Each structure stands twice: as C-alpha cells, then as structure tokens.
Amino acid sequence: MQDLNNRIYRTISHIIENGIYPNLKIEDDVAYTIDPVYGIARNRVNAECVKTLIRINGMDGKDHTEIIEKLLNQLVKKQSPDGCWNEIHVKYDEPSALITSIVGEALLDGYVALRRKDLERTIQLAKDFVLANYTSPGYFKKSSVYVADHLNVDATCGAFIAKYGKVFSDEECIEIAKKTAEHICKYQFPDGAYPYTNENHGNYQYGLEIPCIHYQGVTIYYLLKIIDALESNWLDQELKKGIEWLASVQYNDGRFDWSKSGLMFAYYLSGAYAFAIPCFLYGNKWDSRYIQNSEKAMDVLENNIRDIANRWESASMKSLPSSLITSIRTANLGDYPIKHRAFRFGYGMYRQYARRRFADTVDPKLFNLLSSVMGIETSTIEPDNNFPDIFMTSEILDCLSYSLDHMVVD
C-alpha cells in the first residue's frame, strides 16, 4: 500500500508543480487558475485546487499556505450576492447549486484547516443558496438551465450540506444529507449501477436513466463524503453493490469497458479513473483485491497525464476499427428510438476518433458545424482532438488528494 501512497502523492505533486502553478495568476491577495486552452477561469477548478493544496500542505516539507490563502480570497471575491458561484464553461456561465457546493466544501476546508473565521458568513450564504435549490427530499436542482434530477448533483450537494452540518453542528443539514443519500440509493439499479438521472429528466429530450462509468465514480465518491461527514456506514450495502459494478466493468489492464457506459458526453473521460480510485480503496474494507483495482486505475491515469491530464482516455489510431463494436454496444444502451440510437453511435465514433488525436489547442469548427446541422445545444465544445484539460485535471487532484487524506491505509 505504501507504493500506492507514494504514487498518488508523486502524481499530485507533479500536476501541482508542472500543470497548476504555471497556469496560476496571482494579483495582490488573490490567485486563480487560467485554462491554458480556453483562457477562462473556472470557480470549480480553483476550488478543487485549493482543497488539494490544503490536504497535502506540509507534506514533503512543502508549504502551500500562501497560495491557499489567495485562492480562498479569490473564491470569496467571486461569490454572488445571493450566495452562489457560477458554473463556467466555454459557452456557459450560470449560477449553480452544484458549483456552489464544490466551492462551499473548499471554504469549509479552509475554515477548519486555516482557522479562517472570516469565511463563516460566506459559507453560510453558500449553504442557504444550496438549500434554496433543494426542490424535494433528496433532490437538488443543478441550475436554472439544467433542472433534471441528476443523482451525482444530489450527492455533491448532499456532501457539502453534510459537511456544513458536521462543522457547525446543524442537525437540519445532517438530516437533509441523510435523506439525499437515501434518495440516490433508491434509484440504484439491481446490478449496482447508478443512473445519471431518474425519471425526472427535466428538459432533456430523452431520459438519461442509463449507467455511466464516469458518473458511477462521481456519485459514489460524493456519497463517501456524506458518510464520512456523518461518521456513519449505514449505506455500506448500497456502496458495496456500486463498487462491485465499477469493478465489473474494469479490464485486467485497468482500462474500463466503455461499451457498458451509456452517457455520451461523459464517454472515455480520463477523470473516471481518478473517481474510481477512492471508491475501490473504500471497497478494500470488504475485499483486499480492490487495492489491485485502484493500482490498475492509477496505471491508466498516469498514462493520460503529462503536466495536465488529457480530456479523454487516449488510444492509438490502429485500434480505431475495433472501437466500432464498442460504440455500437454503447449506442444500444437505454430505451431509445432507432434515430436517436443512430445519433448516439455517431457521437460515440466521433469521440473514438477525437481521443486518438492529440493537440495542445482545439479547433471548434467541425464541432460547431455538426452542432448546427444536428441541432445540438451544449455548454461545452467537443473538439475533434484530445487536449490538455485543466478542468479534468482539478477533478483528478480532488479525488487523489482525498484518497491520500482519507482512504489509503498501511
């Protein structure tokens, strides 16, 4: 296990020193990251970076306190008067309970670790905003635009509310967090997979009650944070099933079988391997073989990181023909009409092609053309090449540093 500890720490340190700090802008008492590809500053990326730095601060004799303080100051500065932070993508910048929860968790970490009592009012406003989007028991509305019941969003919001309840001894928040976890697990498939949404699919054209490898890890990861904050293992039976499903779709070489993953916009995301690691490490309490699953996931993850992580899991062009079968199987997941299955297959093959071509920049012309022709509306750009993605990188940092801080055992 010590080898895995060391690998995780080395990967975190390499990304921080060579991927994050070179893209960090410091202005007086604030600091924030700039996306090297798109030139935007995302609240989520800054929050996940500060959580990581807090968790590793002091390790190996390295003091990140000054940067932590300045990142926290920037997050406070970017809070809206109603208590929220915006979700920011290339073509999207809207208030979000999801992002507010992620930032809120970072501020809670700063409040506790650095004794930043000045953050208390900011955190309280964030909590109030998130609870204002608590639409029904267990269901948090992601934003005014995306109103479906996304189970991973429920888990993320629930994790922040649980942590708030623990830090400030707020029994109402603790109870809401419990109901949220139970709500999520109510929709777990018999085989252990969690759907992306439940029957409330909001304004999506089609329901997304389908399994997704990436969001399986996301959902379990934030459920782990809920039970950690509440210091309870009452969800262990559901978590065990969920982790078993995640292990069942992993090949012996560590790669995932993406033919079992039906959410096209999360197809082959490299961060899926990072989210899986704390899940497998938690599963070690039942079966020590899950350590091997963690190590194999780490193998794939390391192969997809230079200084910043690839957006998608990479592959060679010579394997493109064999990916046809994978995409056909993926397209057939879910109960969709033939025309939409054809669209899903086309989307899958577009991703199969794109993840095999790497460049440091992106050209959105082809994606914009296809979007216009097919009437696709999206908040992000899906270019026809793989690229260094700081958004995916900050998620990876959050997962790995949480694993190092909470999950890795001797």
Image (spheres, rainbow, N blue to C red):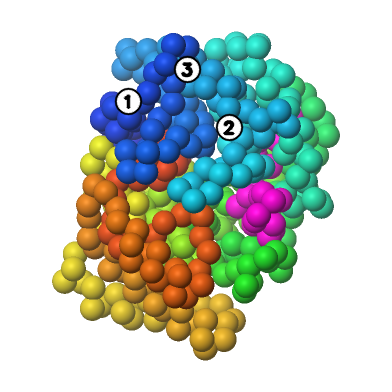
Circle count: 3
What is the spatial separation of the Cα atoms under label 3 and label 1, in whole angstroms? 14 Å
What number is the disc on residue 373?
A: none
The type of residue carrying mark 2 is Val
The type of residue carrying mark 3 is Val
Instruction: Classify residue 174 by image quadrant.
Output: top right
What number is the disc on residue 21?
A: 1
What number is the disc on residue 103?
A: 2
In the rendered image, residue 217, in percent from the top left (x then y), is placed at 50, 52
Question: Residue sitting at 81 percent across and 52 percent down?
Answer: 136
Tell which circle, 2 or 3, labels the residue nearer the N-terminal end.
3
Looking at the rendered structure, the secondary structure element under dot 3 is strand
Question: Residue sitting at 23 percent across and 42 percent down?
Answer: 306
Q: Which residue is mark 3?
A: 30
What is the spatial separation of the Cα atoms under label 2 and label 3, in whole angstroms? 15 Å
Tell which circle, 3 or 1, labels the residue nearer the N-terminal end.
1
Pick the residue in front: 410 or 390.
390
Looking at the rendered structure, the secondary structure element under dot 1 is helix
What residue range appears in magenta?
Answer: 141-165
In the image, taking residue 398 as reference, residue 355 lies left or right, namely: left
The type of residue carrying mark 1 is Tyr
Whether residue 174 is in magenta: the answer is no
**Magenta region's main secondary structure?**
helix
Question: Residue sitting at 72 percent across and 19 percent down?
Answer: 121
Tell which circle, 2 or 1, labels the residue nearer the N-terminal end.
1
Query: In the rendered image, which quarter contains the C terminus?
Result: top left
Question: Residue sitting at 34 percent across and 70 percent down?
Answer: 350
What is the spatial separation of the Cα atoms under label 2 and label 1, in whole angstroms? 19 Å
Pick the residue in front: 363 or 287.
363
Crowd tier of the residue under label 1, counting other residues whose Cα lies within 10 Å: few below 14, some 14–19, many 20 or above: some
In the rendered image, residue 158, in percent from the top left (x then y), is placed at 68, 42
In the rendered view, would you say 129 is above or below 272? above
